[in-house]
């Protein structure tokens, strides 16, 4: 597995990195969240911009990115607009989605950007190339909020992401049974053995183990709740870090 360096953080080495989302609806809420999350000392901060009421206003998005960067100059920043079909908060056409991504990439105020696999491959390739030109790492993602696809499907999607040039492939699933959770962990282990620096998680209460055990199975990062959860099953940074430290000491 080739580690990925963003600012002072090396993703893919040691304890899985903790990503904490900010999901404010307004500029004021976002700044309050940033102040709160700074004290938690996450490895990476994710701006879930689909929760921002002015996300369609590119100037407002650029201004907000400047404010966030000003408040946390040394913490790697991940920009995510989660589409409605994959659990996001705001409907947006594919053209507008990729236009937003381009605007954000052009600000060069982020280190990582999330793009979704199941969009338009031509536009996706174009934006991934644009990200690489800007020196921004791409997390290529897929989220299933109702079920867990078959092992073969999940492996195919991760391999497809890697073949498209993703720096970090990511899948999130919703387990309905313990067997679903084991499927996700099995997929993660196989990806680790093949050298892919993946992020994987099973959501909800049943999936909690997957958020805690990345160092064992091979997920290089995990998400914890800040003021709000961005997905079902996220726990606090302090709880997550405590378990991670125990696992690391005995690995």
Image (cartoon, rainbow, N blue to C red):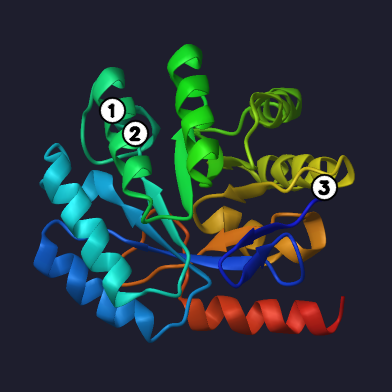
Q: Is residue 71 above or below residue 219?
A: below
Kindly tell me whether residue 81 is visible in this rendering: no
Q: How many labels does the image show?
A: 3
Q: Which of marks 3 and 1 is nearer the N terminus?
A: 1
Q: Give coordinates of residue 250: x percent, y percent.
A: 86, 81
Residue at (75% x, 57% y) in the render: 3
Residue at x 36%, y 56% (from the top left corner): 109
Q: Mark 3 points at which residue?
A: 192
Q: How far apart are marks 3 and 1 (CA)?
A: 33 Å
- Residue at the disc numbered 1: 99
Residue 213 drawn at (x, y percent):
71, 64
What's the mark number on residue 102?
Answer: 2
Q: State whether residue 142 is above or below residue 72.
A: above
* Residue 13 appears in the figure: yes
Q: Are marks 2 and 1 in contact (CB under 8 Å)?
A: yes
**Could you say which is closer to the camera, residue 19 or residue 247?**
19
Helix or strand or loop: what does disc 3 sit on? helix
SS at badge 2: helix
């Amino acid at each position: 597995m080739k580690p990925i360096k963003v600012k002072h953080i090396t993703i893919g080495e040691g304890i899985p990195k903790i990503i904490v989302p900010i999901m404010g609806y307004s500029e004021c809420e976002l700044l309050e969240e940033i102040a709160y999350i700074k004290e938690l000392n996450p490895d990476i901060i994710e701006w879930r911009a689909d929760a921002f009421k002015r996300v369609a206003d590119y100037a407002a998005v650029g201004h907000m990115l400047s404010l966030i960067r000003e408040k946390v100059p040394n913490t790697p920043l991940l920009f995510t607009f989660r589409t409605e079909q994959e659990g996001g908060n705001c409907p947006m056409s594919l053209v507008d989605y990729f236009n937003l991504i381009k605007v954000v990439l052009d600000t060069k105020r982020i280190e990582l950007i999330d793009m979704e696999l199941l969009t338009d491959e031509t536009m996706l390739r174009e934006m991934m190339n644009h990200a690489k030109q800007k020196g921004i790492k791409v997390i290529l993602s897929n989220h299933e909020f109702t079920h867990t696809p078959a092992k073969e499907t999940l492996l195919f999607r991760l391999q497809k992401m890697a073949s498209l040039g993703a720096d970090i492939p990511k899948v999130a699933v919703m387990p309905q049974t313990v067997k679903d959770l084991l499927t996700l962990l099995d997929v993660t282990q196989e990806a680790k053995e093949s050298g892919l620096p993946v992020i994987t998680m099973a959501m909800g209460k049943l999936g909690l183990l997957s958020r805690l055990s990345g160092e064992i199975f091979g997920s290089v990062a995990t998400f914890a709740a800040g003021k709000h959860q961005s997905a079902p099953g996220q726990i606090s940074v302090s709880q997550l870090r405590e378990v991670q430290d125990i696992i690391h000491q005995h690995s």
